[in-house]
Amino acid sequence: MRHHTRPIKLFLPIMALLLALAPAAYAKPKIVLLATGGTIAGVQPKEGEPGYKSGEVSVDQLIEAVPEIKEIADLTGEQVANIGSQTMTNDVWVKLAQRTNEVLKGDAAGVVITHGTDTLEETGYFLNLVVKSEKPVVLVGSMRPATAISADGPANLYQAVALAASPEAKGRGPLIVINDEIHYAREAQKINTTQLDAFKSPNAGPAGIFIGGKPHFYFRMMSPTPRRAHFPWTG
């Protein structure tokens, strides 16, 4: 009786190739979190009391507060600044933009930026002009401090990381995610100082929404891509 060894010889190399490719196929996207402070990193004097101080929680503490993020991305953090966004400066903007471009030149799949809401739209518009990569850049904040009852920061941060890790976010320019909504950064405006749905895009409408922890886009903005950014900045 003849033994059919040829199929086995062909099968073994294929299995070896599949095993070699498996780690890459199941690898989580690498996302870098650049923290600048804001309400999302704010702390109340005493839990439940009104008033708080922005920029008291570190980037590592923000990440640790949302352990579910580890299931969707390989997330690392850097503290670019830790201020209330009402005190945002040109120097911080330039530092943030430079670091964003540097990170995106590497193996990171995307960048998430935590930010206070007072000047979130200005920072988003600036980054839309100067970011040179088509990889996702997602800005996120919160309307309640980290120590508040029903703080919205953890859910917003989770969604921001999920958005930055999504292939669908590539090539859309900087985005803002807050309260289950996605906005193109160049279009977003803060229209309320107390409600969770404080951001809207009056001229274009929201870019998309989150359903079940996953982003869903409505449309793609017709605008110059980040690669052809229309601001002559060489930082």
Image (spheres, rainbow, N blue to C red):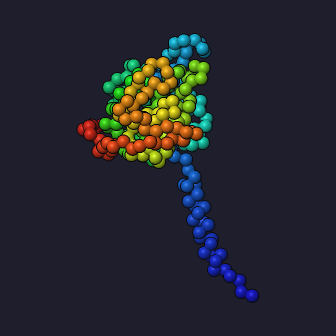
Residue closer to the observer: 149 or 103: 149
**How far from the left and from the top, in percent, is residue 58?**
52, 26
Q: Which residue is depicted at the point 65% across and 75% down? A: 8
Q: Nearer the viewer, residue 210 or 14?
A: 210
Is 8 on the left-hand or right-hand side of 107?
Answer: right
Q: Residue at x 55, y 39 (%)?
A: 211
Q: Position of residue 181 (x, y in %)?
A: 48, 34
Front in this rendered view, residue 21 or 193: 193
In the image, residue 187 sits, relative to residue 222, either above or below, namely above
Residue drawn 38% across and 19% down?
A: 87
Quadrant holding the N terminus = bottom right
The vertical placement of 102 against 125, above or below, is below
- Across and down, in percent, residue 199 comes to 43, 27
On the image, which quarter does residue 155 sit in? top right
- Work out whether residue 209 or residue 65 is closer to the camera in this orientation and state it: 209
Q: Residue furthest right?
A: 1
